[in-house]
Amino acid sequence: MYAIDEKLEELESAGTPIQIGLVGVGQMGKDIIAQVVGMRGIEIAVAVDLTTDRVAEGFQLSGGDVDIICTDDVSEADKALRAGKKVASTNYRVATRCENIQVVIDATGSPEMGARISLDAINNKKHIVMMNVECDVTIGPILRQLADNAGVVYSLSAGDEPGSIMEIYRFAKALGFEIVAAGKGKNNPLDSYATPDQWQERARARNMNPQMLVEFVDGSKTMVEMAAVSNATGLVPEVRGMHGPKCVVEDLTKVFCPRSQGGILGRTGVVDYAIGDIHPGVFVIVTTDNRRIIEGLVQRDMGNGPNYLLYRPYHLCSIETPLTAAQAVIYGEPTMKPRKRLTSECIAVAKTDLKAGTVLDGIGGYCYRGSIDLHETAKKERFLPLGLAKGAKLKTDVAIDQVITYDMVDLPESVLLQLRRIQDTLMS
């Protein structure tokens, strides 16, 4: 990554910029298009959404006259790309199958679409950048394995909080520090029972889909993101749902440390989050018993220990995503990927009393929220993964705050479910 600006400049000078296929031109997708406009050596060649009008609107962020062809036919799209045109489509396979596309970005937010997009991209030897963390925490290990087998990169995105945490984590691990905790600041009020109708006006004021905002407010997004960190690092949630204390940046090392040191942790090597002035930052708490290094840390104003804060005060979300696409193509490396086995599971918990026969809605809806637990616990108790809950039909009543299990639901068949079954078989 250190010379990525020079590598991109070389590609620009050679007239061979990286060609991206983008699926999802909502808030995140539009940010990606707008950011790539100002970059060298990389282009959005194909963009896909539910309507080509929405895609065209995104491409207009490029400024000036953009020559756009609207087609759902891969051959026609290939021809347009060779002629130097941009392609707008409603068919994700145009992004995953066009010959010139080197890397596909999934910005849909739908676990089922993430499964379909990733599977097709990998099958067609395209790198995949997964902004769809909800999909990753459900079937990330099998997608990573399929990508490895195909010789392409499967990666979560730089700029998302998991990717930003991973940046600090790798720095700390490379230097030989012991990891005490890794986490993020929560960026919205926490209301585990929030529903879209309660947050509709505030969502409209922020130009957001109400369900997207509720996913943040009810804590589901935080649980998903920290499950992704757990699955990429092996760090664990100490308790279901994590601790989530209220604190400020200057107190992070005093809070996220062992109880024997006055903190909240019964063990080290955990993922967690905090409510306070930490957002939009992410953090890793480290320690060392090397006296020489401790002296150096004190001299460099890192505090008197025994724990030290590595803090990134920002994450730029989709604005940073093109760097992961470039890293995959240029270096063949991910920003972040899950290990081959899950460490944590993001599970579905009832937000309200639910009746038998209810068909569960989506994440950020009315029926359920996400929480995090150890994968081994979730497996033993047959807890339903959050990503599989949408469209499931309850076979029994479920009480508010009760974890939904596989035994309580009939699941609709899907590509996502098929891949999850394969993953579970390989991990058994």
Image (cartoon, rainbow, N blue to C red):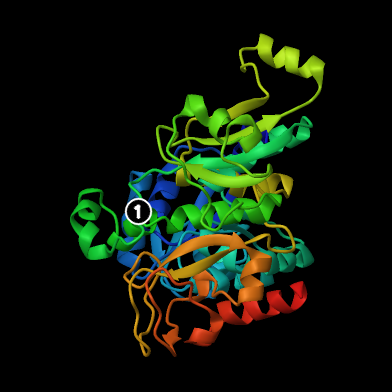
The residue positioned 21% from the left and 64% from the top of the image is: 197
Locate the C terminus and report the quarter of the image it occupies.
bottom right
Left or right: residue 150 compared with residue 314:
right
**Residue lying furthest left:** 201
Residue type highlighted by circle 1 = Val
The quarter of the displayed image where residue 401 is located:
bottom left
The residue positioned 76% from the left and 27% from the top of the image is: 288
Foreground of the two, 337 or 297: 297
Residue 50 higher or lower than 202, as above or below: below
**Residue lying furthest top:** 299
The reply to whether residue 81 is in sight is no
Left or right: residue 110 compared with residue 170:
left
The quarter of the displayed image where residue 421 is located:
bottom right
The percent position of residue 356, horizontal first and vertical second, equals 37, 89
Left or right: residue 427 compared with residue 8:
right
Residue 72 higher or lower than 194, as above or below: below
Q: Tag 1, which secondary structure?
A: helix
The reply to whether residue 257 is in sight is yes
Q: How crowded is mark 1: few (under 14 residues within 10 Å), some or many (20 or more)?
A: many
The quarter of the displayed image where residue 307 is located:
top right
The residue positioned 68% from the left and 57% from the top of the image is: 338
The percent position of residue 156, horizontal first and vertical second, equals 59, 53
Identify residue for label 1: 217
The percent position of residue 245, horizontal first and vertical second, equals 46, 41
Locate the N terminus and report the quarter of the image it occupies.
top right
Instruction: Report the number of discs.
Output: 1
Residue 10 higher or lower than 154, as above or below: above
Foreground of the two, 320 or 352: 352
Foreground of the two, 119 or 301: 301
The percent position of residue 73, horizontal first and vertical second, equals 49, 76
